[in-house]
């Protein structure tokens, strides 16, 4: 499947934000103004690029996204806002597009001013680096503590035309709803109006990035940007149509893949675990239980140790706030039943099988809490020594 999406070019260069020569500035540029939408952090402490981008995307159009890694430009006051605006102004001038159609995004250390002059001098080389096949360089330029780039692709038929959806994300720590828990960028060459794109993005984010946690901390810089060029077809995607359903599915598929990659790459993580809850009174209850279990530090350390400690899981579910009868609870780790109808069934043989299941890179913990129709899930990872080491040394 081609990584190229009609109507977009990508770039990544070293702009002096990080030490050495690591790529730290990325650019997405559309050949023409693209339909655009975004979802942003619900943290009350919001970085300057989040505030600027959210305001500019209200118009439903965007032609360029300027991204830097290594510095969040958060809690940087008036100077931080002015620097972000100046960078978008310079980028717009070099590209020859309106400044209002250029949005910024930043990720990295909080409370440090951007090296504005150095970055400004890097914008011409950044624009010169733009190419249709530049997504790989862009994906590396936005990384912080990520172990590698995070890219996902999907195709969708609109009429007789095959359109593409490309997603790129970064994130490994400070990952928890609401809303997106990372920086994410989705580009597509379908034709779609801004209202439909935003509705679909919100729904897709709710069922993917808002069902993912690494450490329970919601970032100051969370954002997902969605841009549609319309370069593959003039036929618009209508929400309540077969093509609309296919596009919504493709968008969700791309965001789900990215969300899983973010959680799987949780700082120091060795296991990706899906917490699946069934039988709750409502979907909301099921999600609340799954979120509480997935966020529990005691559960996450047990995951790291491959310890089938069902008691920690059940206790977390019990404090979730959702109402259920513990006597009706059953639990599986992988395919191994460890708890049935309110009673543990852990023999030495069962415990050994469950521990073996937990040594896999990816597995599912299933919690049945009753006979209701509520379903919900969350993606989580284990929490170990490496997470502490990375974050203890993050600023130094």
Image: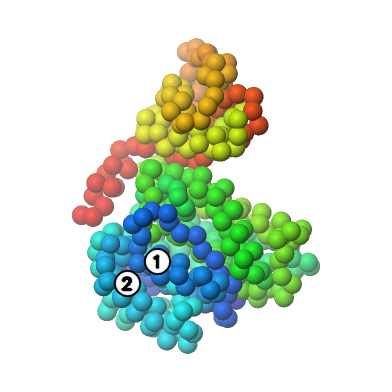
Question: Helix, strand, or loop for circle 1?
Answer: helix
Which part of the image, by quadrant, shows the N terminus? bottom right
The residue indicated by pointer 2 is: 81
In the image, residue 187 sits, relative to residue 307, either above or below, namely below
Instruction: Give me the residue at 42% from left, 54% from top.
Output: 42
Which part of the image, by quadrant, shows the C terminus? bottom left
In the image, residue 216 sits, relative to residue 95, either above or below, namely above
The image quarter in which residue 127 lies? bottom left
Q: Can residue 42 be seen in this view?
A: yes
* Total marks in image: 2
Label placed on residue 378:
none
Q: Report x, y in % for residue 21.
A: 31, 69
The image quarter in which residue 51 lies? bottom left
Count residues near mark 2 (Cα–Cα under 10 Å), then give few for <14, some for 14-19, many for 20+.
many
Instruction: Give me the residue at 37% from left, 30% from top.
Output: 298
Label placed on residue 51:
1
Q: Is residue 246 left or right of residue 171?
A: right
């Amino acid at each position: 499947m081609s990584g190229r999406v009609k109507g977009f070019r990508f770039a990544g260069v070293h702009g002096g934000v990080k030490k050495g020569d690591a790529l730290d500035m990325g650019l997405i540029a559309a050949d023409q103004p693209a339909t655009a939408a975004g979802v942003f952090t619900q943290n009350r402490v919001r970085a300057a690029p989040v505030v600027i981008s959210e305001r500019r995307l209200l118009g439903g159009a965007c032609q360029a996204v300027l991204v830097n890694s290594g510095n969040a430009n958060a809690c940087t006051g008036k100077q931080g806002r002015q620097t972000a605006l100046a960078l978008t102004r310079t980028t717009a001038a070099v590209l020859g597009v309106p400044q209002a159609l250029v949005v910024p995004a930043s990720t990295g250390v909080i409370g440090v001013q951007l090296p504005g002059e150095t970055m400004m001098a890097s914008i011409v080389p950044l624009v010169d680096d733009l190419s249709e096949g530049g997504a790989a360089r862009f994906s590396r330029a936005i990384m912080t503590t990520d172990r590698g780039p995070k890219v996902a692709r999907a195709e969708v038929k609109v009429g007789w035309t095959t359109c593409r959806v490309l997603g790129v994300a970064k994130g490994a720590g400070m990952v928890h709803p609401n809303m997106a828990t990372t920086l994410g960028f989705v580009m597509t060459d379908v034709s779609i109006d801004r209202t439909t794109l935003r509705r679909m993005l919100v729904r897709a984010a709710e069922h993917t990035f808002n069902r993912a946690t690494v450490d329970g901390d919601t970032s100051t810089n969370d954002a997902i940007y969605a841009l549609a060029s319309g370069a593959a077809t003039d036929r618009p995607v209508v929400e309540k149509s077969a093509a609309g359903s296919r596009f919504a599915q493709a968008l969700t598929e791309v965001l789900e893949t990215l969300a899983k990659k973010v959680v799987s790459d949780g700082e120091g993580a060795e296991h990706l675990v899906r917490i699946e809850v069934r039988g709750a009174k409502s979907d909301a209850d099921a999600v609340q239980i799954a979120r509480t279990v997935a966020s529990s530090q005691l559960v996450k350390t047990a995951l790291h140790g491959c310890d089938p400690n069902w008691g920690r899981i059940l206790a977390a579910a019990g404090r979730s706030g959702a109402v259920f009868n513990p006597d009706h609870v059953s639990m599986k780790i992988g395919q191994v039943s460890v708890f049935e109808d309110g009673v543990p069934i852990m023999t030495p043989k069962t415990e050994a099988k469950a521990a073996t299941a937990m040594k896999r890179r990816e597995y599912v913990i299933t919690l049945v809490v009753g006979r209701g129709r509520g379903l919900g899930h969350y993606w989580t990872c284990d929490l170990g020594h490496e997470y502490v080491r990375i974050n203890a040394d993050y600023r130094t």
